[in-house]
Amino acid sequence: MAASKTAQPAAAVISGIGQSAVGRRLGRSGLDLTIEAVKDALQHSGLSIKDIDGLACWPGRTAASAGFAPVSIPELHDAMGMNLNWYSGGGEGPGQLSSVINAAAAVSTGLADHVICFRTITESSTRTNLTSMGPLTDWMQWLLPFHAYSAANWTAQYAQRYFHEFGATREALAALAIHSRSNAALNPKAVYKEPLTLDDYLSSRMISSPLCLYDCDVPVDGSTVIIVSRRECTSDLHRQPIHIEAMGCRLEKRHSWDQASDLTTMSMSSAAESMWSRTKLTPDDVDFAELYDGFSIITLLWLEAFGFCGKGEAADFVMDNSNIALDGKLPLNTHGGQLSAGRTHGLGFVHEACAQIWREAGRRQIQGPSDTAAVGVGGGTVAAAMILNGGR
């Protein structure tokens, strides 16, 4: 189907996925969770640890926020006895898909054959506090006097402006939260599975107007692994590889939350535009979408950035369940997203997209076509977009 539009198969493919236990306050070290996820991915792909010659993560180990990035590349390398030809980790980049983007570039240029990309968090077990934000010499010094301590505050101003410009209401965000909870009920690893109603949503406590409790993602402990391989090295593995059809991560607009020229969109508009310029596929070729929902409004902005609906139309789009349900026109966040399944960060969306393409998603499996996925991760100042294609 859609794959026939691709002039030449992608050099970089995904050959396996893995994930540790995911949950609230698991009380396990980040390294322990990461090793579990790596072993799961190796078994899934048919590779051995000796086959792995590349390692990538984002943002690298950092103490800037406790539990946000508790594992470094050297720690995992030593713990599993790897021999690496290439590795990469660092905070500056297009955010949570940086590791996959860097790995794709590495295997495409011959620096490595098989790269483990990992994202590990223990935020649920490790309580953060104001001092973890770092010294007040960085950009936070300009926000703290206004009590803008959290990304919830920063994102809420985008939601307010979006509501003002396009007449959207909280019911649209509620529709997305309820939809996510419905999908999470089919996901064994999801944190929250109990039904969510409109009354539940509207009566929940406000976090930063207009964003309430159910508009915010759920901190968890867990690790996710994506194995990026050179296509020529996957002929004898367990599954037909998933092609990385196109990626985009353009840094175009001002790198600022509160000084953007248009507060009805974020960095995802540039990332998606860059991605579409690198493929012959169009939004009509996409079977389903896994779009970041650190806060519910971000998913609406991703829908518009990808072109699945027009500017200002995403609120109406998600309120029509025939658009986003598992049997809808564009199944959305099929695992429950971060609003209900838990904040496994960007690689969690890639993991779910691959599970759906390989038709390994269990009770939440899309019954219609699931060959081509749109994945959009991030918001605010950094974002990355990709199209994955099963090639069937």
Image: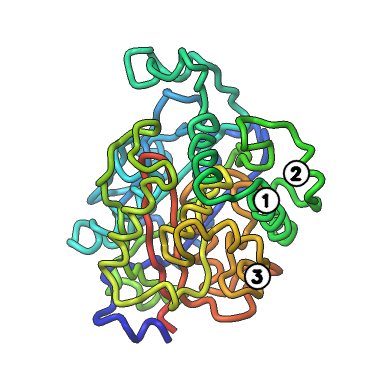
Depth check: 308 or 390 in front? 308
Residue count near mark 1 (Cα–Cα under 10 Å), binned few <14, some 14–19, many ≥20:
many
Q: Position of residue 257 (x, y in %)?
A: 39, 33
Say if residue 41 shows up in the picture: no
Among the two numbered marks 2 and 1 on one chain, the one whose residue lies closer to the N terminus? 1
Closer to viewer: mark 3 or mark 2? 2
Secondary-structure class at tag 3: loop
Q: Position of residue 39 (x, y in %)?
A: 51, 54
Name the disc covering residue 168, or none: none
Q: Position of residue 286 (x, y in %)?
A: 46, 74
Q: Quadrant of residue 25?
A: top right
Q: Is residue 359 above or below residue 163?
A: below
Q: Is residue 269 above or below residue 130?
A: below
Residue count near mark 2 (Cα–Cα under 10 Å), binned few <14, some 14–19, many ≥20:
many
Depth check: 136 or 311 in front? 311
Q: Position of residue 179 (x, y in %)?
A: 69, 58
Identity of the amino acid at label 3? Leu
Identity of the amino acid at label 2? Tyr
Identity of the amino acid at label 1? Ala
Asked if the residue at tag 1 contacts the one at tag 2, i.e. Cβ–Cβ closer than 8 Å, the answer is yes
Among the two numbered marks 3 and 1 on one chain, the one whose residue lies closer to the N terminus? 1
Residue at image location 73% in from the left, 47% down from the top: 192
Which residue is labeled 3 in the image? 326
Say left or right for 334 vs 162.
Answer: right
Which residue is labeled 2 in the image? 201
| Total numbered badges shown on the rendered structure | 3
Residue at image location 59% in from the left, 47% down from the top: 338
Which residue is labeled 1 in the image? 177
Point out the image quarter for the C terminus.
Answer: bottom left
Mark 3 and mark 1: Cα distance apart in space: 15 Å
